[in-house]
Image (spheres, rainbow, N blue to C red):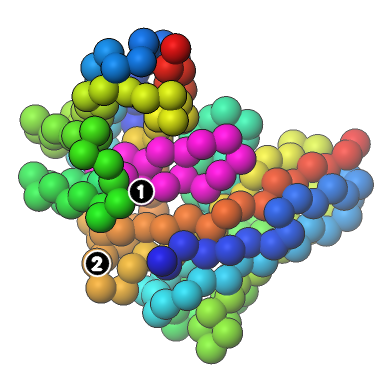
Amino acid sequence: DAMVIQNPRYQVTQFGKPVTLSCSQTLNHNVMYWYQQKSSQAPKLLFHYYDKDFNNEADTPDNFQSRRPNTSFCFLDIRSPGLGDAAMYLCATSREQSQETQYFGPGTRLLVL
Amino acid sequence: SQQGEEDPQALSIQEGENATMNCSYKTSINNLQWYRQNSGRGLVHLILIRSNEREKHSGRLRVTLDTSKKSSSLLITASRAADTASYFCATDARDNFNKFYFGSGTKLNVKP
């Protein structure tokens, strides 16, 4: 059974057109993460939620926002996608602190035309 | 930045051989984890080693950690074609328990 679900798996958007990626989890984990991964690169942490507390990485562009309306769901909003935002976006969860394993979703591949 | 470096960037071996990947990081950690990623998919957790541990085994995987050198290695013994994937190490940030940083990854190709 899928534990971290990402929808859609593939998303095509136009330059400058807002897009939302979604992530849901059935693990009841406190921490949820969004990573950006470009081709042949390491996943780059964009932000994370510890429960309702939002933590932004210093170098995450303002163009990227996130919402976590409840424990199960987390959204990544890209307000004005540019060509450089085309990437795989990975959602992950962990139960508590960093001593815990992260569980990843399958990712959403974003294409910007 | 805390983000680690892995070497080699790419490794190609024959089935049955052992594969060794190395990871180096920059600052103190609580633990280090290794993940595997098949092409175009999410990451799958392989093994976690805590900062007070030196070696850990899981099936055909053996991980070592040397905190004095800020490095770790992942050994896959008796490799199989199905082991073909990218392997990443991930470290936490000691001052923020909830943040993880991934190394640059090693792309492993196991030829049948």
Q: Residues within 10 Å of mark 1 (few under 14, many from 20)?
A: many
Indicate the secondary structure of the residue bearing disc 1.
Answer: strand
The label number, if any, that marks residue A45 in the structure image: 1
Within 10 Å of disc 2 (Cα), the crowding (few <14, some 14-19, many 20+) is few
The quadrant in which the N terminus of chain B is found is: bottom left
Residue range corresponding to the magenta coloring: A31-46
| Main secondary structure found in the magenta portion | strand
Q: Say what secondary structure mark 2 lies in.
A: strand
Taking the spot 51% from the left edge, 83% from the top edge, the residue there is B67
Up-down: is A12 above or below B106? above
Magenta stretch encompasses residue A51: no
* Residue A29 x/y as whole percent: 22, 44
Q: In front here: B31 or B47? A: B31
State the residue in front, B16 or A67. Answer: A67
Q: Nearer the viewer, mark 1 or mark 2?
A: 1
Split into 4 quadrants, where in the image is the C terminus of chain B?
top right
Chain letter behind tag 1: A
| Residue at 47% in and 38% down | A37
Q: Is residue A42 magenta?
A: yes
Residue B83 appears in view: no
Residue B84, percent from left and from top: 74, 40
Taking the spot 27% from the left edge, 13% from the top edge, the residue there is A17
Badge 2: chain ID: B
Q: Amino acid at mark 1?
A: Leu
Task: Write down the residue under mark 2.
Answer: B96
Q: Position of residue B6 (x, y in %)?
A: 63, 61
